[in-house]
Image: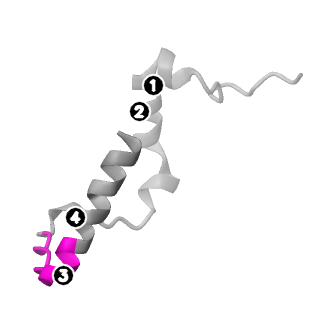
Amino acid sequence: MDALPAGANPFDMLINPQAILDAIERSTHLQNLERKVCRPLDKAVPAKPAQAPDVAAFDASIDRLIDRTYY
């Protein structure tokens, strides 16, 4: 098996994480990447619309059946 080139040890992040982070900061390839901050979890979650009474009753009956069958 061929030896890995210097700096290509997959366990370096575990052994010497600061060296890896320094190499990332010095990387011109990474610096040239386009950056965009996405925050999808910052959006408010809309409230669930109210269900019709017959749909809610049907859902509840299914839930009770599942509870009796599996629990």
Could you tell me which secondary element the residue under label 2 belongs to?
helix
**What residue does disc 1 label?**
19
| Label 2, label 3: how far apart the Cα atoms are | 61 Å
Question: Of discs 2 and 4, which sits in the foreground?
Answer: 4
Q: Nearer the viewer, residue 29 or 9?
A: 9
Tell me which label, 4 or 3, sits earlier in the chain. Answer: 3
Using a 10 Å C-alpha cutoff, classify the residue at mark 4 as few (fewer than 14 neighbours), some (14 to 19) or many (20 or more).
Answer: few
| Label 4, label 1: how far apart the Cα atoms are | 56 Å
Q: Say whether residue 33 is left or right of residue 51.
A: right
Q: Quadrant of residue 61?
A: bottom left
Tell whether label 2 touches label 1 (CB within 8 Å): yes
- Image coordinates of residue 27 in percent, x first then y, are 48, 46
Q: Quadrant of residue 32?
A: bottom left
Which segment did they paint magenta? 45-57
- The amino acid type of the residue labelled 2 equals Asp
- The amino acid type of the residue labelled 1 equals Ala
- The amino acid type of the residue labelled 3 equals Asp
Tell whether label 3 touches label 1 (CB within 8 Å): no
Name the residue: 18% across, 74% down: 56
Q: Which mark is residue 60?
A: 4
Q: The C terminus appears in which quarter of the rendering?
A: top left
| Label 1, label 2: how far apart the Cα atoms are | 5 Å
Residue 49 counted in the magenta span: yes
Name the residue: 10% across, 74% down: 47
Extreme residue toward the top, this view: 15
